[in-house]
Amino acid sequence: MPKPVPALPEPAHATVDSMLSRKFGKEVANYFSGSPLNRVSFLRPDHAFLSSALRHPSTAFVLFNELDPLVSSPHSLATVSYSDVKPVIGEDPFASSEEEVIKAYNSSTYLPQIIFLGLDERKGKEGFVYKEHYKGQPWFAVDVTPKESVKDAAEKLVEGMKAKGLDFQKGRMNMDLEAQDAAIYAEARHLLDWNARNPFCAACGYPTLSINAGFKRTCPPKDVAPSIQNPERPPCATRKGISNLCFPRTDPTVIMAVVSADGQRILLGRSKRFPPAWYSTLAGFLEPAESVEEAVRREVWEESGIHLGRVVIHSTQPWPYPANLMIGAIGQAIPGGEEIHLGHDAELEDAKWYTAEEVREALRVGTSGLGEEPGPDYKEGGLRLPPKTAIANQLISAVVNGFASGSPMI
Amino acid sequence: MPKPVPALPEPAHATVDSMLSRKFGKEVANYFSGSPLNRVSFLRPDHAFLSSALRHPSTAFVLFNELDPLVSSPHSLATVSYSDVKPVIGEDPFASSEEEVIKAYNSSTYLPQIIFLGLDERKGKEGFVYKEHYKGQPWFAVDVTPKESVKDAAEKLVEGMKAKGLDFQKGRMNMDLEAQDAAIYAEARHLLDWNARNPFCAACGYPTLSINAGFKRTCPPKDVAPSIQNPERPPCATRKGISNLCFPRTDPTVIMAVVSADGQRILLGRSKRFPPAWYSTLAGFLEPAESVEEAVRREVWEESGIHLGRVVIHSTQPWPYPANLMIGAIGQAIPGGEEIHLGHDAELEDAKWYTAEEVREALRVGTSGLGEEPGPDYKEGGLRLPPKTAIANQLISAVVNGFASGSPMI
């Protein structure tokens, strides 16, 4: 089972903290957040930093095969060392500066994707130090999918790991990883997927090159691949100033617990693909030029016909399938706006108002992952809900342990 | 001057509402949010809906020339009618179903970009009704930049508008538009820019086609352009299931007011490009697989060296330059974590702790847009701050009118 999400550092000053607590309750750290790594994002363009971090004996490498992570158990990522991955990534993939790498760009060369994940500062005594301030165990992710020029080396590495009893965890969800490993996995998966999904420039259609240790893709002005007659490429809009196309994409989504105007009931909905009796909160993508609050009101009306007034943001959750930021909110129906109509967007098979009591019982006995069975106390036909690792569960809990109980809402 | 942002519908039920108010204060609707339009997003793939909405006599068209909107004054968008834009967009650009449009795809045909913005339901009596439920004045945006096959028709339209005393508002910022026009402008600009910025498929490098009235780009399997020898294209990953590459991109950013551990001071920073004495909150892009709360802590440490504990989300603001969602937060430094160090990311020229009193005075006399002068009461050398249309101003106000005054923080 996943461990509880890590506790946040608590500020010691009682007055301000209690004022914040009274206003907002405890900060909720959702699953996939709570990474122990300092990303030191400003060091990513510095090849000397990357080169020494990559080759340090304390450095941890997380391996991926087609987006499946190497694990030592369903609860833990496995890590390997520089000497293990060297046959796949080469002696020093960060030996040259980015400027030099861009100048030498050759679209026919396969480079296994490497991501610099961050420094684990809790392990600063193991020796890696850069420019005095930056200490800790460096973490990298490497795509060791056996293909192209690294096919043989990667196959050998994969077989070696299997011989040690390690394996790549198949399947889309890795929700059994303990919380800190889940956060590291999420960072790596999101970036590996973004790089793999975007091999071409959306502005000009030419192949692009990964730089900044996996956090940027650039459209080089030249390509020296032997099959290309003229290495000079036409001008590209992404080379002028800063273009968001060069940076990883994260899609903001809204997910919301909806309460009735009197605060006594909560709305839950189900899609056709859910198992019987399984309900959850409504959710959807935020659209261009919407505030979160507007997106929540729009999605709830489109999917359920309900009109919301006030919307408050509760907490957020990274969701690396493939690239979402879940923004969790609580919305309140306006009086007279509570009638359910599923005919607008027709995404839901059903939506219903539940009492806090029904939902509290379901939180006690009926939670599980989508592909899993509920616990032993669950009675057939009873309401089923998402597990604690889902922000939906946190939002539902916040509402039914707040509004209807008289205690603070979140 | 911009009008104040629109009031939100207030739920009437006193108990729940006062509980939410006590917890969260008033919901803040930031500039660029508060659109009066119902986007009815689920109707965008329905060409019969789009066709009748586009050609209705009540329909409002907002025109853009290279992303500059047609305005009747610095405070108001101008709108034109179907008969005005027909020479540029043609009789009925939505005459065929999307399936037919994709089958007939010809990458050499220039189609001026059209965006369906939504229905203004306050004007439902003017006659447009679709399938009983969907009433109101339809709004569209059209790119009338004189180019390609519409050069002459667009030039004529542009000249006609100028003859009427209307003009396209130059420049990047349109912060003088009244609030509801600003929200409509933001939606249109974000989508026109996204379509213009992404003419090619990032998965396969081939040209793509705008569908869903500007809210989706698809990579057609065939291209019947005369210059192309084989109309059949290779397989593309975006044609399998749902790909986020087909949908508009919105980049989540974090922007935060930072308070000291004792809640008595607020941190402000300045970039080199700001005018003298001008400071603001810190801000930055959320990264893959970060929660908002984590992104706030990371950015503040990277830019200022300050360590934050608790982070709470205040409100959000769409920011269409080009595609941001600003997520406004308040963060509190941990005791002992307040020392400023600008050497990590080196984005700021300066950062300082200010008292609430200094900041309240600056909010009174020293606010203005980046290119504008402060008001008449401003004294040379005094602190300058962003205007009310910026979420930075709202966050700063929330802090200095809360923590230090003893009244509710937001």
Image: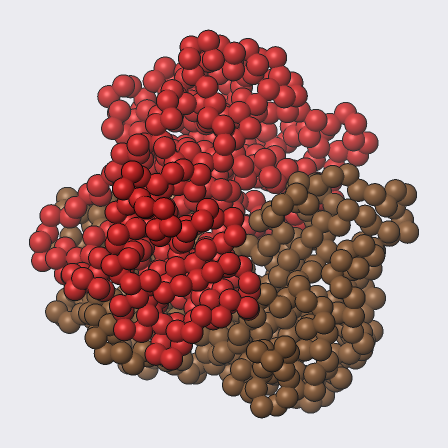
Chain colours: A brown, B red
In-image side of A47 versus B391 (left or right): right
B233 over A47 or under it: above or below: above
Q: Residue pushed farthest front?
A: B380
Toward the viewer: B378 or B257? B378
- How many numbered callouts? 0
A364 over B98 or under it: above or below: below
In-image side of B328 versus A140 (left or right): left
Res. A294 visible in picture: no
Toward the viewer: B105 or B307? B307
Q: Which residue does the image show at 63% across and 82% down from the upper left?
A: A129
Res. A128 visible in picture: yes
Q: Residue pushed farthest left?
A: B14
In the rendered image, residue B354, in percent from the top left (x then y), is placed at 33, 62
Q: Looking at the rendering, which quadrant does residue B352 occupy?
A: bottom left
Toward the viewer: B142 or A232? A232
Quadrant location of the C terminus of chain B? bottom left
Quadrant location of the N terminus of chain B? top left
Q: Looking at the rendering, which quadrant does residue A157 occupy?
A: bottom right
In the rendered image, residue A357, in percent from the top left (x then y), is placed at 17, 69
In the rendered image, residue B172, in percent from the top left (x then y), is placed at 49, 35
